Image (cartoon, rainbow, N blue to C red):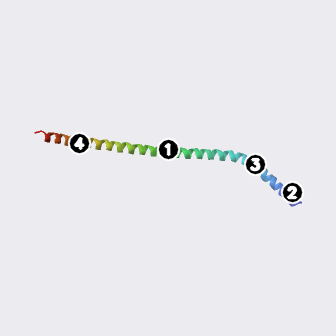
């Protein structure tokens, strides 16, 4: 009988200490989890923005290079057309 009273007393003591501890620790852990989740997602968001910026710069650079090539091709075609046109005239 004394063992069961001691066991009940120990269980009561654990509950008395555990409940307030959980009441304090649970909200703190929840807030920390939320902060961690938000900071992680903003870090991922920032990384995605950096990647998008790099891609847009690459596209801009590629389009600028393409514009130069088209201008060069137009010049070549116009020069050939002039030479052909002047060669046809006596």
**Nearest to viewer (mark 1 / mark 2):** 1
Point out the tag, 2 or 4, that comes first from the N-terminus. 2
Image position, residue 46 (x, y; %): 50, 44
Image position, residue 85 (x, y; %): 16, 39
Would residue 23 be found to the left or right of residue 81 on screen? right
Q: Quadrant of residue 7?
A: bottom right
**Nearest to viewer (mark 2 / mark 4):** 4
Task: Measure the C-alpha gap from mark 1 to mark 2.
Answer: 60 Å
Give the position of the N terminus as an image quadrant: bottom right
The residue carrying pointer 2 sits among few (fewer than 14), some (14 to 19) or many (20 or more) residues within 10 Å by Cα, namely few
Label 1's element? helix
Q: Nearer the viewer, residue 7 or 69?
A: 69
Image position, residue 79 (x, y; %): 20, 41
Would residue 74 be found to the left or right of residue 37 on screen? left
Q: Nearer the viewer, residue 71 or 79?
A: 79
Label 4's element? helix
Residue located beneath label 3 in the image: 19
Q: Nearer the viewer, residue 28 or 40?
A: 40
Labels 1 & 4 near each other (Cβ < 8 A): no
Task: Measure the C-alpha gap from mark 1 to mark 4.
Answer: 46 Å
The residue carrying pointer 4 sits among few (fewer than 14), some (14 to 19) or many (20 or more) residues within 10 Å by Cα, namely few
Q: Nearer the viewer, residue 61 or 4?
A: 61
Label 2's element? helix
Task: Measure the C-alpha gap from mark 1 to mark 3.
Answer: 40 Å
Residue located beneath label 1 in the image: 46
């Amino acid at each position: 009988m004394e063992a069961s009273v001691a066991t009940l007393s120990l269980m009561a003591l654990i509950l008395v200490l555990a409940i307030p501890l959980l009441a304090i620790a649970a909200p703190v852990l929840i807030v920390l989890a939320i902060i961690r989740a938000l900071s992680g997602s903003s870090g991922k968001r920032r990384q995605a923005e950096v990647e998008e910026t790099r891609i847009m710069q690459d596209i801009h650079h590629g389009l600028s290079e393409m514009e130069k090539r088209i201008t060069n091709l137009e010049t070549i075609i116009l020069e050939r057309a002039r030479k052909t046109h002047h060669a046809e005239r006596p």
